[in-house]
Image (spheres, grey):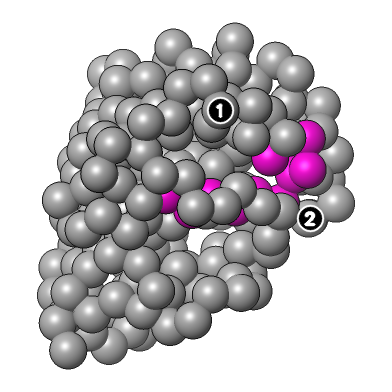
Amino acid sequence: MFDSRSSFAASPDPDRGIMQRAYRAWAPAYDLICGGLFASSRRRVVALASTAGRRVLEIGVGTGLSLGDYEADMEVTGIDASEAMIARAHRRAQLIASAEIRSLSVMDAENLSFPDGRFDAVVAQFLITLVEKPERVLDEAWRVVRPGGALFLLNHFRSKNPHVAGFETRIAPLLHHVGLRPDFPFDRIEDWAADQTGITSISRIPSGPMGCFSIVRIGKAAG
C-alpha cells in the first residue's frame, strides 16, 4: 500500500517574501485563470460554511471571488496578505456581494487581530499549502472559531496515487517561485488536528475536476 508519509519528501514551506511577490504578479490575472476552475468548489464550500452560522471569516480572501456566493443573511469578513488582492476584493464587494461585508483588510493569517470565538465559520480556500507556517495559521483560524462552529479548508493535497504523487513532487520545485505547491500532504492537517482539543469531527469531501480538490470540515465542540 502507498504510504504518503514516507514515499515522498514534500517541498519545504514557502518563504513569505516569495509568496507575496508571486501573488502581486498573479493579482491582475487571478480572476481570469482561477474564476472558472474553482467556481463549483468555491460555491460548495461557501454553502457548507453557511450551515455553521452567519458570521464567516475568509482567510486569504484574495480578489473576493467568493463574496458573491454568500447569501444576503450572511456576515462576511475577509483578510489577505496581499494589498493588490484586497483592493480588487473591495471593488468586487461593491459590485456583486449581497451578504453584509463587515470588512476586507490586509492582515497576517499567522496573527489574526480577532478575539477568540468571534466567528461561526472560518474558511481558507487554496491557502493553507501556500503559507510560511501552515500549523500556525491553522492555530489562529481554530482560535477564532466559536465553540460549536467549524473550520473549512478548500485545497489541493498531494495525491494518494503514487504515480501522480511522484509527478507532483518532481514539479513542485519548478512551481515554488510562482506561488504554487502541488505536493502538500494531507497528513499535516491530520497531524495538526491530533494535537488539538475540542475537535468533534474531520471530514474530507472530493471536489473540483476529477476530485482534484478537497473540502475539509473540522468541527469544534460546543462549549
| 166 to 137, vertically: above or below | above
Viewer-nearest residue: 107 or 215: 107
Question: Disc 2 versus disc 1: distance between alpha carbons?
Answer: 33 Å
Tell me residue 88's x, y (percent).
68, 29
Which residue carries the number 2 mark?
15
Disc 2 marks a residue whose amino acid type is Asp
Disc ID at residue 94: 1
- When the figure is inspected, residue 150 is found, relative to residue 31, above or below; the finding is below
Q: Nearer the viewer, residue 138 or 9?
A: 138
Q: Which of the labelled discs sits on residue 211, or is there none?
A: none
Quarter of the image containing the C terminus? bottom left
Question: In x, y percent, where is residue 84?
Answer: 78, 35
Residue 53 painted magenta: no
Part of the protein shown in magenta: 76-86
Give the residue drawn at x 29%, y 76%.
146
> Where is residue 28 drawn, in percent x and y?
75, 18
Specify whether residue 77 is painted magenta.
yes
11 relative position to 217: left or right: right
Locate residue 134: give its quadrant.
Answer: bottom right
Q: Is residue 22 above or below residue 198?
A: above
Q: Quadrant of residue 196?
A: bottom left
Q: Are marks 2 and 1 in contact (CB under 8 Å)?
A: no
State which mark lies toward you, 2 or 1.
1
Relative image position of residue 190 (x, y in whole percent): 32, 66
Q: Residues within 10 Å of mark 1 (few under 14, many from 20)?
A: few
Determine whether the residue tagged by mark 2 lies in a helix, strand or loop: loop
User: 50 or 173, which lies in front?
Assistant: 50
Please tell me whether mark 1 sits on a helix, a strand or a loop.
helix
Q: Residue at x 64, y 27 (%)?
A: 91
**Dot placed on the residue nearer the N-terminal end, 2 or 1:** 2
